[in-house]
Amino acid sequence: MKQLYTLLLSISSLQAIAQTNVTAQINTKADALQSQIVAWRRDFHEHPELGNHEVRTSGIIAKHLQSLGIQVQTGIATTGVVGILKGDKPGPVVALRADMDGLPVIERTPVPFASKVKTTYNGQEVGVMHACGHDSHMAILMAVAQVLSTMKSELHGTVKFIFQPAEEGVEPGQKGGAEEMVKEGVLENPKVDAIFGLHINSQTEVGKITYRPGGTMAGVNDMQIIVKGRSAHGAYPWSSIDPIVVSAEIINNLQTIVSRNIDVTQNPAVVTIGAIKGGNRSNIIPEQVEMLGTLRSFTLADEKLLIERVKQIATKTAEAQGATAEVKIPYSNHYPVTFNDPKLTEKMLPSLQHTAGSENVLLRPPVTGAEDFSFYQEKVPGLFFFLGGMPKGQDPLKAPSHHTPDFYIDESGFTLGVKALCNLTLDYMNSYGK
């Protein structure tokens, strides 16, 4: 019995030593790539492309993966790129995902690699900027591919690198993003067992990783409400059924959904009207008004409740004034809840803690922003976490937020993202089936 215990202890010690050696390899290789990661990121940042237009971007990524001897597929969901790296030993298939698209934002950051790109979006001339950090995600995953391609002997399985277009959505009438990649079979051939992804965060300090099991980012539905009344001269409002007044009442009444219908002690929710269009002169009451908005929730039950209440409030408020309201939800896009599989999260948390230090891996509250990484998580277990990108010592409340012209990322935290994704991949493979 004592001999058996000694043998098991020896095996355990050897495994611990082997893991330490692999971690040391990853750290050394990742640190050596820091300047290259920054160079990739700055190049992408200076040359951003909108969703489904990432032609230059995807070309650079595909060429890099091919140079590593990785099998490459291009043109998935318009501009998507997938790389497949087979390890020397059998095992599961792990997918790692980065998004590629920029946003229609005019950059205002005082960096030498700031974007000067302009293009046409939805019929308007716009600036283009990586105002959400997708340039960082691509550079990090390119480095992960480079590190893991040199460690095939340590890979018990296959790694699938997914570079996805159009996470931020596409122009009306187009298809794209994670939903389209899933439809085109990105999780098949070979079939993915688990998927990991990260998102840089401009209001989380460099060196920190944050995560949340279960509902992490909100499910989102956009909506269109068209209120139809009767036009009249602005001097004779009694001759009209004023859709502007009706719309104002609808907007106010919609605010009661979250405050009176949602149990906010369990999950947050959001109902926002972001655009209202109606009329073209000061003295003409228009015939109709269009409103556009967004709904955010963290459970299917709350999503259903939001949709039902918006439709009920809009139509009944309009009816009370003699008008009509047409409600379309979703109007042009829908993302499910970004849901971190609780068992997978619990299993992989030690990997994140080992990478960044337990004191630097923090549980975070739910985020009412949305992510189409959720479409992958509907099909396979997934873990999506956040990587700090805010300079140390800065006040998070004063750090420019995502999707703004002043969005800024401290590049010193990129290698932590590389190490985290590498360790998650290897640790998942080594623990698969255990």
Image (tube, helix red, strand yellow):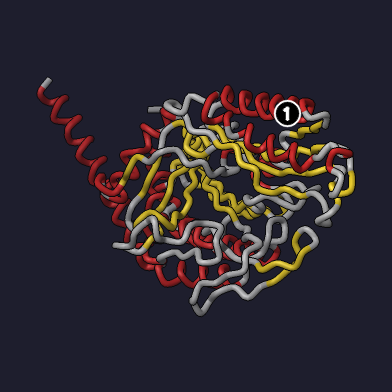
Q: Which residue is mark 1?
A: 317
Does 369 appear above or below 341? below
Residue at the image position 58 percent from the left and 53 percent from the top = 99
> Within the image, what quadrant is residue 44 found in?
bottom right
Count of marks overlaid on the render: 1
Which quarter shows the C terminus? Answer: top left
Q: Is residue 192 visible?
A: no
Query: What residue occupies the far bottom of the structure in this picture?
Result: 112
Position of residue 369 measured from the top left corner of the image (x, y, whole percent) = 53, 44
- Label 1: few (<14), some (14–19) or many (≥20) C-alpha neighbours in 10 Å: many
Position of residue 264 measured from the top left corner of the image (x, y, whole percent) = 46, 28
Whether residue 25 sits left or right of residue 172 in the image: it is left
Residue at the image position 64 percent from the left and 64 percent from the top = 57
> Within the image, what quadrant is residue 255 found in?
top right
- Which amino acid does the dot numbered 1 rest on? Thr
Q: Is residue 2 visible?
A: yes
Position of residue 26 measured from the top left corner of the image (x, y, whole percent) = 35, 56
Position of residue 292 measured from the top left corner of the image (x, y, whole percent) = 71, 44
Q: Nearer the viewer, residue 119 or 396?
A: 396
Q: Nearer the viewer, residue 106 or 252?
A: 252
Does 4 appear above or below 348? above
Residue at the image position 40 percent from the left and 65 percent from the top = 410
Which quarter shows the N terminus? Answer: top left
Q: Secondary structure at mark 1?
A: helix
